[in-house]
């Protein structure tokens, strides 16, 4: 048996056809459809894995709505922050909305004050905080 560490957090959906697995992957600013040759049992195994993960996963409560302000950015339409729960919300240009947990107030201030939201996001936020897609 060979073990591998997996991070499937960017996978939005998985399907199976005669050609194999199709994975819809969130690349931050866009979604990408990937095709991987695989038999039907691989798909069934992934479905079972998903069910197990959902049973044992604890998701911290997130604010239902964060007031976001429109921004002048090619990457994002709006950003918002809830200081009490330390959750940053970004509405990307493609309409997807993500919330990032554990974001310090200083990081929010720096994002708010930066000349390039996209550059700051890529350097300081992306991959550094747990995120949930809420829309």
Image (spheres, rainbow, N blue to C red):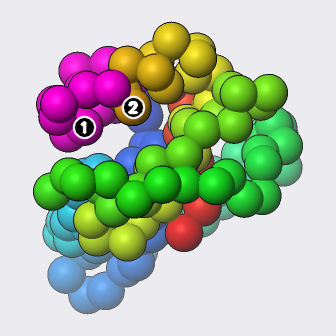
Residue 61, position as x, y percentages in the image: 84, 43
Is residue 41 one of those drawn in magenta?
Answer: no
Say whether residue 52 is visible: no
Q: Residues within 10 Å of mark 1 (few under 14, many from 20)?
A: many
What secondary structure characterizes most of the magenta part? helix
- Quadrant in the picture for the C terminus: bottom right
Say which residue label 2 marks.
112
Query: In the image, residue 63 lies at what x, y percent?
Result: 78, 48
- Report the side of 6 relative to 54 (left or right): left
Q: Which quadrant of the figure has residue 125?
A: top left
Q: Give the answer, above or below, for where 134 lies relative to 84.
A: below
**Badge 1 is on which residue?**
117
Residue range of the region highlighted in magenta in the rendering: 113-127
Residue 28 vs residue 80, the one in the foreground: 80
Q: Residue at x 40, y 78 (%)?
A: 15
Residue 133: x and y, percent?
54, 56
Helix, strand or loop for disc 2: helix
> Label 2 vs label 1: CA separation?
8 Å
Q: Secondary structure at mark 1?
A: helix
Which image quadrant for residue 57? top right
**Callout 2 crowding tier (Cα within 10 Å): few <14, some 14–19, many ≥20:** some
Residue 121 in picture, x, y percent from top left: 29, 32
Work out which residue is located at the far bottom of the displayed protein and give it. Answer: 18
Q: Is residue 126 magenta?
A: yes
């Amino acid at each position: 048996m060979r073990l591998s560490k997996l991070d499937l957090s960017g996978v939005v959906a998985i399907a199976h056809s005669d050609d194999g697995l199709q994975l819809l992957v969130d690349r931050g600013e866009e979604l990408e459809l990937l095709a991987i040759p695989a038999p039907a049992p691989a798909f069934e195994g992934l479905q079972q894995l998903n069910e197990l993960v959902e049973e044992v996963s604890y998701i911290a409560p997130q604010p239902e709505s964060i007031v976001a302000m429109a921004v002048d950015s090619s990457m994002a339409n709006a950003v918002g922050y809830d200081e009490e729960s330390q959750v940053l919300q970004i509405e990307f240009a493609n309409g997807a909305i993500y919330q990032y947990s554990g974001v310090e107030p200083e990081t929010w201030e720096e994002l708010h004050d930066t000349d390039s939201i996209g550059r700051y996001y890529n350097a300081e936020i992306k991959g550094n905080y747990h995120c949930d897609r809420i829309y």
